[in-house]
Amino acid sequence: MMELESNHNSPVLTDPEPTSKSRLGIHSSLYSPPNVVFSLGLFLKIQGKKPLAVDDVRSNSWLDAMKSSSPTHRKKAKDFASELVLTDTDVAYHNWMLKYPSALVSFERITNYAQGKRIALFLDYDGTLSPIVDNPDCAFMSNAMRAAVRNVAKYFPTAIISGRSRDKVYEFVGLTELYYAGSHGMDIMGPVRPLSTDHVNCIRSTDKQGKEVNLFQPASEFLPMINEYWTAIAQCVQKTLKDYPRLRLTHGRKVLEVRPVLDWNKGKAVEFLLESLGLTNCDDVLPIYVGDDRTDEDAFKVLREGNRGYGIFVSSAPKESHALYSLRDPSEVQFCSWEVKFLGS
Ligand SMILES: O=P(O)(O)OC[C@H]1O[C@H](O[C@H]2O[C@H](CO)[C@@H](O)[C@H](O)[C@H]2O)[C@H](O)[C@@H](O)[C@@H]1O
């Protein structure tokens, strides 16, 4: 099994030292998008088209910010406009955000650092551009996310780097203007023709938030059995692979992958693409990589170790990472994708 070491001591990029405020995720003069104010990873839709400073909606201390963004608080505030209650999960997440500040809240700082630089954007697919769903064949990207990525690609070279096959991820994304790196970067290609995104046997269902989704789960009756035997199966595959020294086993979320023993991963793919784009060893280039999985750590590490760019880790739960910043979920990735026009030269 692939285990990644945690090596997150301090940010290595050489932009100005973050103030205690920005490290706490309460930067004072952040732009917010039209009609939206964000507060530590939570969006509030509001009226008005002018970009708004968040000072007036953001509290002055970390604890206040933490309290105000707590779902429990918001519910209570709505119901009773009184007592604040923080769950252990709230506290853990906001403590984690001290180490991995939200890219949204740090947007001004990132923008400042990117001044005069050319951005190259790398995006993971599952869990970054599409929400994690039970059936991998139904991990569809929303049209809104697609439009946001198309917008990004108007400004910067943009690549999708996925553990999926290149064809499959292209089928999901369907944008000809992007670069695609499939199979953890082992299969990289530029623009190709779109494939059909129709799937047979999909049923209409609802997700955990009650939203309508298409679902394709022909093996759902096997799920209890898979849950019961998952560990045993993983051990069995691991044991079998001992006889195949040129293959190695990696895993994601209930995914076992057998890969050739090859010094190649998403980090190498980022380096390869930067080189192909003529963007390597240039001081005026700022690569940004957004990903949610442990396989994305190789890319975060490449950017971090060379002081080369920003890793942005998409996670709604506290986890160690080589990234510098965080975003909570794909909806925050989507929002950021509309804002990147403010970045770079
Ligand atoms: O590198 P990525 O683009 O993030 O792809 C990583 C793996 O993604 C898929 O699996 C994950 O997403 C599925 C759909 O949301 C989910 O059902 C599964 O539990 C996740 O592990 C894909 O199926 C794998 O082949 C990719 O390696």
Image (tube, rainbow, N blue to C red):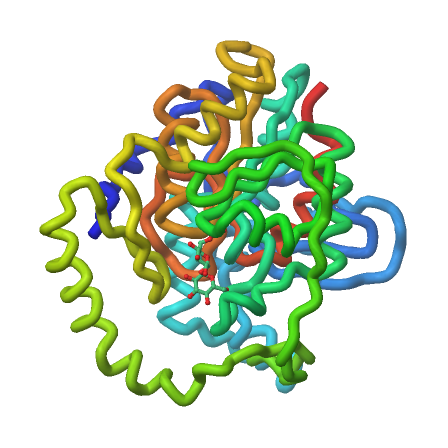
On the question of residue 224 being in view, the answer is yes
Q: Is residue 195 above or below residue 230?
A: above
Q: Is residue 94 above or below residue 27?
A: below
Q: Toward the viewer: 321 or 229?
A: 229
Q: Where, quadrant-wise, is the C terminus in this rendering? A: top right
Instruction: Tell me if residue 125 comes above or below residue 76 in the rendering.
Output: above
Q: Residue furthest bottom?
A: 221
Task: Locate residue 188, reporting x and y percent.
Answer: 52, 34
Q: Residue at x 48, y 73 (%)?
A: 134
**Does residue 77 appear in this view?**
no
| Residue extending furthest toward the front | 243
Residue at coordinates 35% horizontally, 44% vertically from top-left?
321
Is 76 in front, or is 233? 233
Quarter of the rendered structure image containing ligand 1 = bottom left
State left or right for residue 33 relative to residue 109: right
x 64%, y 17%: residue: 117
Q: Residue at x 50, y 82 (%)?
A: 218
Residue 203 location, quadrant: bottom right
Is 7 on the left-hand or right-hand side of 302?
A: left
| Residue 333 location (% of width, % of height) | 61, 50
- Check the image and name the residue furthest to the top: 282
| Residue 112 in picture, x, y percent from top left | 63, 24
Q: How many marks?
A: 0
Return the residue nearer the eye: 302 or 164.
164
